[in-house]
Image (tube, grey):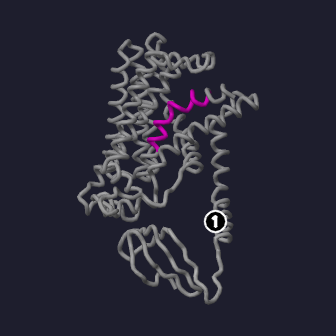
Amino acid sequence: MLLVFLGALYDSLPLIPLALGLVWTLRYQQIADLSLAGSFSIGAGVAAAMLAAGHGVVLALLAGLLVGVLVGLFMTLTVNVLRIEPLMSGLLVLFVSYAVSLGITQGTITIPSEHNPLEALLNLERTAGFALWMHPYLNLVFLLIGSILIGVSIFVFKSEWGCAFRALEDQSGGKAYLSSLGVSAGALSTTGFVVAALLASISGMLVAMRDGQATSSLGLDSLIEVIPAYVLGIALFEKRPRRIGGNRGHGGKSETTWTQGYLHSVLNTISSFSAPVASAMGIVLFFVIINAAQRWTGISWLPRVVIGVFIMLLLGLRPALDAWKRRRTQRRATQVVQEGRNLIIKDLTVAYATINGPLQVLDGLNLEATPGTVTLISGRNGCGKSTMLQ
């Protein structure tokens, strides 16, 4: 069982940045960005070529990151400037990146073991415990990549710019509202494409150094594997909180900035902040399933794509299961109020839509229910006595 888990980590950890790139484009921007496969391949090819030529690890990593940024800017040019449909833009960028990667690698390029900082990963199953983490160059690379990922995560999930970018997921009115605030949707889109391509190139470099070689078709193969794992993680692990609140000031009142109000009401519904964690967990679980299936069936050549398609078919049954759970919950939650008696409901959260405005959320409500009406008594961010529902 330990070897199954170690094998899953061996396969999944380098692909987690690619899954985060899918979160950036497929989830936040609602775009199926095939250019991620191109960024993956060209980043791996450039880093492998520089390592094979004897250049330093840091220089090779920086070169791979640079070409990843260039791929993201190229994708931005085709979508935002040339106004090409995003799917076709992704195909165009993928073909160009594939051609460049093919010219660099000539099909396949091998990284000499003396220049490969992740050489210790090549003998993972023969390593006792986790002693491989003591490899100095391995620690250097993971420290560099981890610093980049942490920096990007802090920028995206802790800054107002990142909060605004996540609001792009609201396809109904997010872009219009951001424009009214003076935030350029085009600049946000550029940020999304560049960060996604950067993450994909990081993933490609890690996979190339893990395998000791880079191939021109590596990106598309990896993207095909990551997509069902991403879907698996989102379906199983993502949680949607009821509310994202602001900082509490004096007197319990909320201190708001320009990103709160509408933006937070949007984030209440999409809850995208948990998508990266869910996708990473999905990647690990996907490869745990694959390694377990290969070991227990004895079929070492069992195609990962076949397992991915089977998992996605099983996930297709999830909506029917959710509908059954909702009906069961509704039956349990139904409470009959007899005539002449009242029912008090405390600490309730209510979400409702206005005619021309965004979704409004009231929390901490106390409701008094009778057979004919439901009356609001008080609430933390809304108070008074009025009939809400008849």
- Residue sitting at x 35%, y 20%: 58
Depth check: 166 or 305 in front? 166
Residue at the extreme right: 297
- Helix, strand or loop under label 1: helix
Extent of the magenta region: 7-22
Q: Give residue 333's position: percent from left, percent from top.
A: 64, 70
Identify the image quadrant of residue 96.
top left
* Residue 196 shows in the view: yes
- Compared with 159, 71 (above or below) is above
Most common secondary structure along the magenta stretch: helix
Q: Give residue 122's position: percent from left, percent from top.
A: 56, 18
13 is within the stretch colored magenta: yes
Q: Give residue 265's position: percent from left, percent from top.
A: 40, 63
- Residue sitting at x 66%, y 50%: 313
Label 1 belongs to which residue?
A: 326
9 is within the stretch colored magenta: yes
Depth check: 79 or 289 in front? 289
188 relative to 134 in the view: left or right = left
Q: Residue type at mark 1: give it.
A: Arg
Identify the image quadrant of residue 352.
bottom left
Identify the image quadrant of the N terminus: top right
